[in-house]
Image: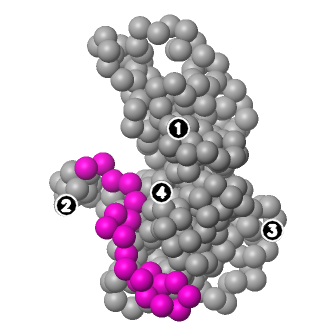
Amino acid sequence: MAREIAFIEALRAYATDPAARGLMDDAAVLQLPGGDLVLTHDMLVEGVHYLPDDAPADVAWKLLAVNLSDLAAKGAEPLGALLGYAMTDDAAWDAAFARGMGEAAEAMGLALLGGDTVRMPAGAPRALGLTAIGKAPPSGAPSRAGARAGDRLWVSGTVGDAGLGLAIRQGRMQGDAALVARYLRPALRLTLGQALAPLVTAMADISDGLLIDARRIAAASGCGMTIDLGAVPLSGALIAAAGSDVAARLAAATSGDDYELLFTAPASRDSAIAAAASAAAVPVTPVGLCVAGEEITLTLEGETIALPDHLGWLHE
């Protein structure tokens, strides 16, 4: 068992408040008389979640975007954020990050409400945290749980672009600058998430990879899934750089940082989902089916293929 999973399992015994959703979800949902609040916290660590030479403004954007992606998966309206910032000896980097944070918050319509700053030891990597707070939709915030056998599995946008963008930034391959942009500055799916919230049975964002996040929905919902690798949407830029063979598709389906929405719904809602996606100007694609049981099955052109050893990103 990965250390990350083991640690979360250890905490689960203490996270007994209903708002915690058993630590099985993207965010906590706190029920209040005036309307439910959605709370989420994500961190970025230098050398793990971003490269040391990434521009401070890009890091600020990504820190906000990954947290707002969790709100999008709950159909929530952003209300504000609390920043946790670890300062190093680089005052110029700090200043550039602050400017970038202000620009990103304004672009995303998010209020910075406060937070905390600390001083890191010399030579330590930067560690950045952000807590985003949102207002749940009237229909309730979807969870990872709720998918039922017979539901379709859908994904928004395209997947694999950010993983390829990282490889390009690291000099491991060549490709379009649009792929790097997907890695540095993830797209926001807030409008789509809010439109989908009343229609879905379960919803999450793809932070660690389509396959691993699909498995998390399946585990939380108590169902299995059959996923059609050939249906997984790939961008033209990705296909031009990496192709669309089995290896390229598996890489796309297991790479992280896409922050697209992954959701389930009964087939009777197909037309409503298409209308919601059209209104939000974000394409959505059915890529699988929820089934009875607990297994994740991967198919290609009607044939079952072996699952990869790693379904996505985990902190080992």
Q: Residues within 10 Å of mark 4 (few under 14, many from 20)?
A: many
Please tell me in which quadrant of the rendered image residue 20 appears.
Answer: bottom left
Amino acid type at mark 1: Gly
Amino acid type at mark 2: Met
**Magenta part of the chain:** 297-316
Q: CA distance from mark 4 to mark 1?
A: 17 Å
Mark 2 or 1: in front is 1
**Marks 3 and 4: in contact by CB < 8 Å?**
no
Query: Can the viewer see residue 173 in this picture?
Result: yes
Please tell me in which quadrant of the rendered image residue 8 appears.
Answer: bottom left
Residue topped by disc 2: 1
Residue topped by disc 4: 255
Q: Residues within 10 Å of mark 2 (few under 14, many from 20)?
A: few
Residue topped by disc 1: 171
Q: Residue at x 43, y 88 (%)?
A: 304
- Residue 235 lies, in percent from the top left, at 68, 61
Q: Secondary structure at mark 4?
A: loop
Q: In the visual, does 227 lie left or right of 108?
A: left
Q: Secondary structure at mark 2?
A: loop
Q: Secondary structure at mark 3?
A: helix
Residue topped by disc 3: 278
**Marks 1 and 3: in contact by CB < 8 Å?**
no
Q: Secondary structure at mark 1?
A: loop
The answer to whether residue 241 is above or below residue 78 is below
